[in-house]
Each structure stands twice: as structure tokens, then as C-alpha cells.
Image: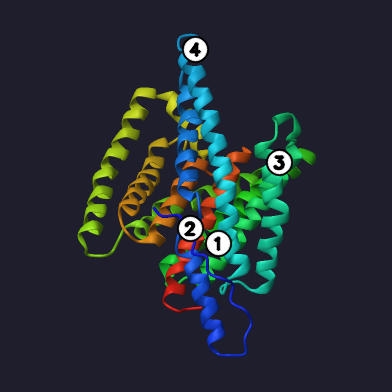
């Protein structure tokens, strides 16, 4: 769970052949471990989602007013904690791509640096840290577009640097999720100006494809999280993940039985999913359960890349698909950056550029 970043100086230009290897080694050391405060942001985002999107809407204000007030305060604290720690973690997470990256072209590095340092981080900081009266819809929409572009660029770079087909597919799913979420939002804005049938249908298709990418990403990333070593710690971690999976699936099944019609509404608040929410809401338990079980397994193991990916997955669950709230939008972007770093790190460790 160490969030330590090795303070290694940037490699300077040199005519010697070993200069490129030194720079690759520096990049590897920076992307192998989670950026500072990543895990704090992950747990705070999960707590904020549980309080704000699940417990508070499920409570009746007339009968539990005092408890509801306390939950609302705790939810606000968790949201602010996730936002502040997420901003710091995202800044450090993007620094390695901009300063040390061996997997990005100069144009991509300029795009990441431009969108990250001069567009997304200042915009999302205004949206998250200032009062709501100063946060306009235009600021949030601008931050949403910058977030999806930034996520798509980083995920595309991870796909290019992936060491095998499986890792490349995971990175492409992250890219597809960000791309179709952005396309869906653009089509929705156009439909508000000129309402036509084809724009509404295209927006629904883009929304559905992006959501499918989100679900496949949660379900498919589990092998990346599970430790593959044969030591005792890795075996215990795998057993813990396998033990947690039926508990998570059973808990969501019981919640569906108890809440009945309210289950779909709370699921939408928590994950912002719509494709199967009316016809088969039980389906969402599978990818969420797999992602939670794999994250706990990675948390208990010793693989730093897997831990980083687990932090990204927990942030993704805490954010939901294509969020519009500034705080969840920030943690969603951080989630894809951490997953991309986890995909890239093994290739750099092996000396592949």
C-alpha cells in the first residue's frame, strides 16, 4: 500500500547509448508505485459514494432526520477528502507521463501536459473547491470534456505500451469508455439545441457502448489484480479474493430482494448505469463483485503494480460510469490514469519501450 514515489532526477540528454536506458529506468520507477494519496482518495471516494448515493437516498427524512443529518455531514467530508487527495494524486500520476514517459510521443505528452496542467486540473479545482454558486454548468461540462480527452490519451498510450494482448484489451476498454462517454455528452448537448430523432438515438447508442465498456473493464481487469506468485502471501490474497466474491454477490442479491423497486434507483445513483437497470439489474452485481474481490486480493498481495490497479478500480467503482459531479469526475479520471500506469509498469520493468 505504499504510495511513495522515488525521487529520481530526470535523465538529461546525452549522446551515450545508455541515456535512453537510464530514462526508461527512471520512468519505470515512477509508474511502478501508486502516486501519493491514491489509496486515501480511493477509500474516500468509496465512502462518499456509499454515504451520498446509497445511504442518504435510502433513508426517510421524516423518521431518521438526526441520523440523516450526520450521514450528510460525513458524506460531505468524504467527498472533500476524495477531491483534495485526488487532485494531489492525479498531479503526481500525470507527472511521470509528461516528464519521463517513454511510451508517449511528443505530441501526446504536450496534450497530456496541456489538458492536465492548464485545462483539467484548474477547471476541476474551481468546480470542486469553490462554492456551488461559482460553479456554472459550463465549467462542469468543460471539465467533463477535458477529463474524457485526458483519460482517452493516457489509456491509448497504455494500449500501445501493453506487453500482451490481454493488457492491451483492458487499455482499449478504458479508451472506449472515455471516448463514448464524451461522444454521448456531445450528442446530448447538440440534441438540446436542435432536437432530432437521429441525435437522440445516436446518443443512446454511444451511452450504451460506453457503459458496456465500463462493465467489461470492471469484470475483465480481475486477472490483472490477482497475484500470480506462489508465495504464502499471494496464496492468502487469492483465497481472500475468492472468499469475498460470493459474499459481495450475495449481499447485492439480498439488497435487491429487500429494496425491490428502490434497488434499481439506488444502483443508478451509485453507478450511473442505465442499460440493464430496468430489465436485469442483477447483472451489474457480477462485474462489481469481481472488481471488489480482485481489488481486495491485490491489496493483500505484494505486487505494487497490482496495488496501483486496485486503487484505480476502487476509484472507478466509487465514481461510477461517466459521472457529472465534479468530485466524482476527478476520481474517475484518476482511476483511468492509475490503471494505465499499472498496465505500462511491467513493460518498463522488463526494459520494453
For mark 4, give the secondary structure: helix
Picture quadrant where residue 127 is located: top right
Q: Is residue 311 above or below residue 193?
A: below
Place of residue 111 in the rendered image (x, y in percent of width and height, measured from the top left):
69, 64
Query: Is the residue under label 3 in contact with that under label 1 (CB below 8 Å)?
Result: no
Residue for badge 1: 155
Disc with the residue nearer the chain's start (2 vs 3): 3
Place of residue 352 in the rendered image (x, y in percent of width and height, measured from the top left):
47, 78
Disc 4 to disc 2, how far (Cα)? 40 Å
Place of residue 193 in the rendered image (x, y in percent of width and height, measured from the top left):
79, 40
Disc with the residue nearer the chain's start (2 vs 1): 1
Residue 7: in sight, yes or no? yes
Query: Is the residue under label 3 in contact with that under label 2 (CB below 8 Å)?
Result: no
Residue for badge 4: 65
Residue at 75% in and 35% down? 136
Q: Which one is in front, 327 or 282?
A: 327
Badge nearest the viewer, 3 or 4: 3
Disc with the residue nearer the chain's start (4 vs 2): 4
Residue for badge 3: 126
Q: Is residue 344 above or below residue 147?
A: below
Identify the image's colour scheme: rainbow, by chain, secondary structure or one colour.
rainbow
Residue for badge 2: 339
Disc with the residue nearer the chain's start (4 vs 1): 4
Amino acid at each position: 500500500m505504499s504510495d511513495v514515489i522515488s525521487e529520481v532526477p530526470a535523465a538529461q540528454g546525452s549522446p551515450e547509448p545508455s541515456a535512453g536506458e537510464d530514462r526508461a529506468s527512471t520512468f519505470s520507477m515512477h509508474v511502478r508505485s501508486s502516486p501519493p494519496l491514491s489509496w486515501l482518495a480511493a477509500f474516500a471516494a468509496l465512502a462518499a459514494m456509499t454515504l451520498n448515493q446509497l445511504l442518504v437516498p435510502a433513508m426517510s427524512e421524516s423518521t431518521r432526520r438526526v441520523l440523516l443529518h450526520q450521514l450528510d455531514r460525513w458524506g460531505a467530508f468524504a467527498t472533500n477528502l476524495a477531491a483534495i487527495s485526488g487532485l494531489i494524486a492525479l498531479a503526481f500520476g500525470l507527472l511521470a507521463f509528461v516528464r519521463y514517459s517513454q511510451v508517449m510521443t511528443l505530441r501526446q505528452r504536450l496534450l497530456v501536459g496541456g489538458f492536465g496542467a492548464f485545462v483539467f486540473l484548474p477547471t476541476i479545482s474551481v468546480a470542486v473547491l469553490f462554492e456551488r454558486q461559482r460553479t456554472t454548468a459550463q465549467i462542469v461540462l468543460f471539465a467533463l470534456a477535458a477529463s474524457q480527452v485526458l483519460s482517452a490519451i493516457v489509456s491509448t498510450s497504455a494500449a500501445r505500451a501493453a506487453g500482451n494482448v490481454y493488457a492491451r484489451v483492458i487499455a482499449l476498454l478504458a479508451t472506449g469508455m472515455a471516448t463514448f462517454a464524451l461522444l454521448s455528452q456531445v450528442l446530448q448537448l447538440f440534441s438540446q439545441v436542435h432536437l432530432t430523432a437521429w441525435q437522440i438515438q445516436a446518443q443512446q447508442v454511444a451511452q450504451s457502448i460506453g457503459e458496456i465498456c465500463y462493465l467489461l473493464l470492471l469484470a475483465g481487469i480481475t486477472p490483472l489484480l490477482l497475484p500470480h506468485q506462489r508465495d504464502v502471501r499471494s496464496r492468502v490474497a487469492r483465497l481472500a479474493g475468492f472468499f469475498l466474491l460470493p459474499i459481495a454477490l450475495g449481499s447485492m442479491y439480498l439488497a435487491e430482494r429487500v429494496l425491490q423497486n428502490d434497488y434499481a434507483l439506488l444502483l443508478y445513483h451509485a453507478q450511473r448505469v442505465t442499460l440493464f437497470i430496468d430489465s436485469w439489474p442483477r447483472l451489474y452485481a457480477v462485474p462489481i463483485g469481481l472488481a471488489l474481490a480482485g481489488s481486495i486480493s491485490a491489496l493483500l498481495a505484494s505486487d505494487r503494480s497490482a496495488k496501483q490497479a486496485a486503487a484505480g478500480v476502487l476509484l472507478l467503482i466509487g465514481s461510477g460510469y461517466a459521472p457529472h459531479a465534479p468530485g466524482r469526475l476527478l476520481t474517475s479520471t484518476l482511476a483511468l490514469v492509475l490503471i494505465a500506469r499499472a498496465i505500462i509498469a511491467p513493460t518498463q520493468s522488463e526494459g520494453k519501450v
